[in-house]
Structure formats: C-alpha cells, structure tokens
Image (cartoon, rainbow, N blue to C red):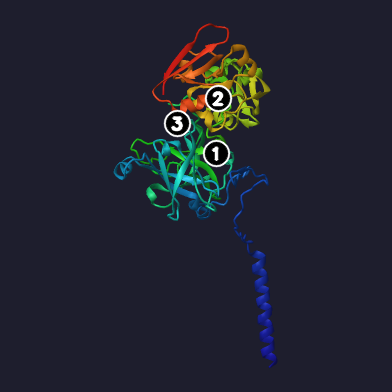
Amino acid sequence: MRIIWVIIITALLSSIFTVGIYRALETPKEVIIQAPSPAVYTNYTDELLAGHIQRNFTSSSPTNFIVGAKKATPGVVNIKSSQGGDYFWESLNASSGSGVIISPDGYIVTNNHVIEEGKSFKVTLSDHREYDAKLIGSDPSTDLALLKIIGSEFEYLIFGNSDSLNIGEWVLAVGNPFNLESTVTAGIVSAKGRNIDILKDNKYSIESFIQTDAAVNPGNSGGALVNTNGELVGINTAIITRSGKYEGYSFAIPSNLARKIIRDLRDFGIVQRGILGVGIDEVDVATAKRLKLENVAGVHITDIHPKSGAKDAGLQIDDVIIGINNVQIKTLPELQEQIARFRPGNSIEISYFRKAEKQVATVILKNRGNTTELVNARKGKILEDLGFEVRNLTRSEENRLAIKGVYVKSIYKHSVIQDTNMELGFIITNINDDVITSVDDIIKSLQLSRGIITLGGVYDGYDGEYFYEFRK
C-alpha cells in the first residue's frame, strides 16, 4: 500500500514539474475578441422634413453590408414617369427610375432626368404597394426633383453627412429598377468633387459628384448611395460608359447638397440660389506661378460682378479662394457645391490668397438680381424662369404717374427678358392687351399666355408706350 502511495505522489509531482517547465518556456498567445465598433457621431441633429441628419462622423464602421442594405432597401422606390394619353401611348412614352423616401409622410427625392418628360408619376414601394405621386418641384441645375405621395408611416432613409465620406470607404448603391424590387451593389468611394460635364446645357449647373465603383445600371438613377450604416450619403445619378452599360464609374449627388435643394423645393417649389457674384476658373501651374502660390490648388477669381456680394466684401480679380467656412477648397466643383448650400441673404466666410498672403472676408450672398430677397414662393417661378423680378407700384408712384402696373426692379443676365432689350425701371401695364395692376396679375397672365407674348408699358420720365415681345 505504501508503495502505491509513493508512486501516485511521484507521478503527481512529476506532472506539476513538467507543466511548470512548459509554462516557463511557452511563448504567450494573444487572443483577440473582435466586436463591431459603432460609427462615431455628435449629438447634433437637424430636421429635414421629418427625418434627421447625422452631422459629423468619421466614417461608417463596421463594413457590414447586411446592416446597411437592411436599413436602406425599404425606403428605395421605383418611379414610373409617363406623358399621359391613352393606355397604348402612355406605355410607349413611359420612363422608369428610382427614388428615395426621405420622410414618413411620403416625400421622395429622385433625379430631374427621371421625371422631366413626365406629366404623371406612379411610385411602387419595395413591398409592391403603388401610389400616384405629385411633383413638388425640380432643379435641372443639380438634376434633382422632389415628389410626394399621400400617406403616413412610410419607411424612409436618414440623411448622412456626405462631407465625412473618405476615399476608399465602402458604400452601397441601392435602386429599384424596372420593378425588380430593391437591388444592392457594393463599392468604394473612388473620388469626391468630380465634374463630368453632364449638365453642360444649363449655365447654372452644379456638378460635384461622389465617384464610386458600385455597379449602377439604367433604372437605378435617383436611387440611394448609402454608407454601411444605412445612411443616405448620395443620390445615384450617372455613369461614364462607352457601351451603354456599367463599366466601373458611377456618380452620385452628395447628400449635403441634395438636402438643401429638396428643402427649397418643398418650401418654395424652386431653389433659392445664393450667388457669390464672381467669374472663376481653376488654378493651373501658370496661374500658381504668376500669383506666387505654394500649391496648384484653389479657385481663381477672374471677374467681379458689380453690386455683388463679393464686390461688397472687397474681393478682387486675381484673389484665389481656398476655403468656405473653414472647409478647404481646392477645385471649382468644390466651391460650387459649398456655395450651393446657401440661400440669398446668408453670410459665408471666405478664405483666400491675395499677393501670396492669406486673408478672410465675410460675404453676404445675393440672388441673380443682386438682392438678398427670396423668390416669392411657387408663383414666382415663372418670373425667375423668364429672368426678371417685379414689384407693385407704390401709392405715391401711382398718384404721380397716374397709372397702375408693376415695376421691373431687376433683369437677369442671359435671360429671355434681357434678350428683349427691356431696361430696368420699365413699368408693365399690359400683357397682350390684358390690363396689369399687380404682381399677381402679371403672374396669372404669364401662366395662361402661350405663343407670342407682348409686354406693354412705360418708363418714368419718357414719353410714349414701349413694347417687348418674346415667345413662350
């Protein structure tokens, strides 16, 4: 019995001794438990319609495509735009694209080119419910449009902060083409601030696209570009292709720009566009050398428009803009995107180089008529489209001139009205022989008139009646 106990104790001590030597000689192992890290946010939120915007975060994390797709797909819809008429012709003249629900009460953002030829619009949700949609407003300058369907508690996307996107960050392109339900593709952000000159026919166009390699095909226009947290960071708009199919380059309108445009469309029916009032160009090597700049970057001022906000703030020809409200500006599209986020009357801080010295100026943006006034809601759109602003005559003017009419207070450059050679101060008293006594009269008359339109009136201090014609 004693021998058995000796053997057991000896074996036990040997085991302990062996384990001790092994632990002493073993290289320590590192055990990593990987857990998802949330996106970094501030607590600041800003309401748009009924949604919120995540104002400031570094980048979306983790790269979990399932989470992003699950959040985004219910809010992406199919939009069928038709020109009306009987069933046969309607089917021939219909076009289709995608859209993004951005509020629980049914506001939908899409591309202008998806709806521009249409007179009626039908929206199909991801769960196959169908709704007739009303066009709230569109903006060819940014290729955006806003629709509205009647209802409540719709699934919608939350706006993300497109400024926070990093080159190389994963994004998802979500569309609803041809009623195939939601399609999701993944890619990375290839570049930001891209100008691909697709809106060249519009002299006020703004192109500062997010470039990705997420596959986007016909029918995905107007769909959502989301980060992997499922937040809306862009509206998919275009591809560059030689074959007509996707070849690796797709472009989206940044969400921070889209958010401002669609808020204007909702509130006014048109975009309240703040104008800096300068002629601009890219900084090239020769310009950088001539102006003694350290870097070939920034936006070169080539012209200053009289009475503009830039002129009032003291900006000069050959100044080089390098920042807007502490946001670095390297290219012309970046400048255009930043300015497009503001309305007339807003003030911005501009950083610029003058004679190789950095300076700062505060500029109050104006409209195209060089005033800080907002356009008179939806009914003012026809006046803006024609290119002029009017006001009612004051009581003293009516008494002194013994007439009633509206006073032309500004005329936009390169507009229909400017082409008639009308001058500022013209008092419109009739349109096609219809008497005009107020701004409401002129808007109503212009809305109802077609073909050749004749504006008749007088100038204070000049004899006789003057007439200006244009075709509508």
Callout 1–callout 3 Cβ contact below 8 Å? no
Q: Quadrant of the N terminus?
A: bottom right
Lower sequence index among marks 1 and 2: 1
How far apart, in angstroms, are the residues tagged by discs 1 and 3?
28 Å
Question: Could you tell me residue 67's position as x and y percent?
Answer: 53, 55
Which mark lies nearer to you, 2 or 3? Answer: 2
Q: Name the residue beneath numbered marker 1.
A: 266
Which mark lies nearer to you, 1 or 3? Answer: 1
Badge number at residue 196:
3
Within 10 Å of the Cα at label 3, are there few (<14), some (14-19), or many (20+) other Cα atoms?
A: some
Lower sequence index among marks 2 and 3: 3
Extreme-bottom residue of the structure: 1
Callout 1–callout 2 Cβ contact below 8 Å? no
Amino acid, disc 2: Val
Q: Which of 323 and 431 is in front in this view?
A: 431
Q: Relative to residue 35, is residue 175 depicted above or below?
A: above
**Viewer can see residue 427:** yes
Amino acid, disc 3: Ile
How far apart, in angstroms, are the residues tagged by discs 2 and 3?
40 Å
Which mark lies nearer to you, 1 or 2? Answer: 2
> SS of the residue at dot 2?
helix
* Left or right: where 357 falls relative to 286: right
Within 10 Å of the Cα at label 2, are there few (<14), some (14-19), or many (20+) other Cα atoms?
A: many
Q: Name the residue beneath numbered marker 2.
A: 439
Total number of numbered labels? 3
Q: Relative to residue 264, is residue 390 depicted above or below?
A: above
Q: Quadrant of the C terminus?
A: top left
* Left or right: where 319 falls relative to 108: right
Badge number at residue 375:
none
Extreme-left residue of the structure: 88
Question: Could you tell me residue 385's position as x and y percent?
Answer: 48, 26
Amino acid, disc 1: Arg
